[in-house]
Every structure is written in structure tokens, then in C-alpha cells.
Image (cartoon, rainbow, N blue to C red):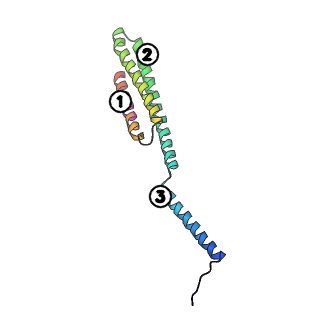
Amino acid sequence: MKRTIKPTKSKIGILLLAGIIFSGLYQMTIAESAPDWRQKMYGVEVQRDTYLKAARQQISELKTKVEVLNVKAKKSSRAARLRLEPVVQGFQRDLHDLDKKCMDLKNSGVNTWDEMKNDLDASIKKLRFEIESTSA
């Protein structure tokens, strides 16, 4: 005797419900294991904004030091002024370059972020050292 299984509405409903639950669990597992690109981009944006805010603060402090040097050069003797003015102008060009690097970093993609960030860090440190060496 052959027995045939007749699908009833309740059996179909249970199978559909099981499929939906399994699908939902599977999607939750995938979502938990790897953040989607929007979350990743948001994290990068927050990191970028925080870093740029700190970098701009450092650049602002360097600009203040350069202005102090500029005032000092103008009040100095002729020999000191002739020595300091070109140095101060060089620092001002370097500060302009740092501002440009900040803008480039702000507009950079995820792939170039680390390289550009490291370049900006190195440039800030180098300029800070040069300014402090001149100030001493």
C-alpha cells in the first residue's frame, strides 16, 4: 500500500516559517561576522574626522609659533632678520603644504588613508622639529 503525503496548509506554513527563521538566522550570522560596507565606511569616517581635527590643531599651534618667529624676526637686528625671514617664509610654505595634505587626506579613499596619514604625521613632526630648532 502506497502512502502519499498530502500537504496541508499547516504543514506548508510550518515549512515556510522554518525557512524564514533559518534565513533570518543565516543573515544575522553573516551580519555579525562581517560588518557591511556602510558600517566600515562610517568607522573610517569617524576615525578620519577625529584624526584631522587633531592634525589641524597641531598645525594651528605650529602657525602660532611661526608667527611668533616672524614678529621676533621683524624686531631683531638686521643680521638676525636677514637670517630669520627666509626661514619663516619656508615655514609658511610648509604650513601651506600641510593644509593641502589635510584636504587631500579628507578627500582620500580608504585604500590611501594609511599612507597619506603617515605622510602627514611625518611632515608635522619634521616641521615641528625645524621650528623648535630655530626658536631655540
- SS at mark 2 in the image: helix
Q: Is residue 112 above or below residue 84?
A: below
Of marks 3 and 2, which one's residue comes earlier in the chain?
3
Which residue is nearer to you in this view: 101 or 12?
12
Look at 65% across and 77% down and name the residue there. 8
**Which amino acid, mark 2?**
Val
Decide if residue 134 is on the left or right side of residue 99: left
**Distance in Å between CA atoms under marks 2 and 1:** 22 Å
Picture quarter with the C terminus: top left
Q: Is residue 46 magenta?
A: no
Please give the residue where the numbered disc 1 appears in the rendered image. Answer: 126
Residue nearer the viewer, 68 or 9 = 9
Q: CA distance from mark 3 to mark 2?
A: 58 Å
| Helix, strand or loop: magenta stretch | helix
The residue singled out by tag 3 in the image is 33
Residue drawn at x 41%, y 40% is 112
Q: Is residue 2 above or below residue 38?
A: below
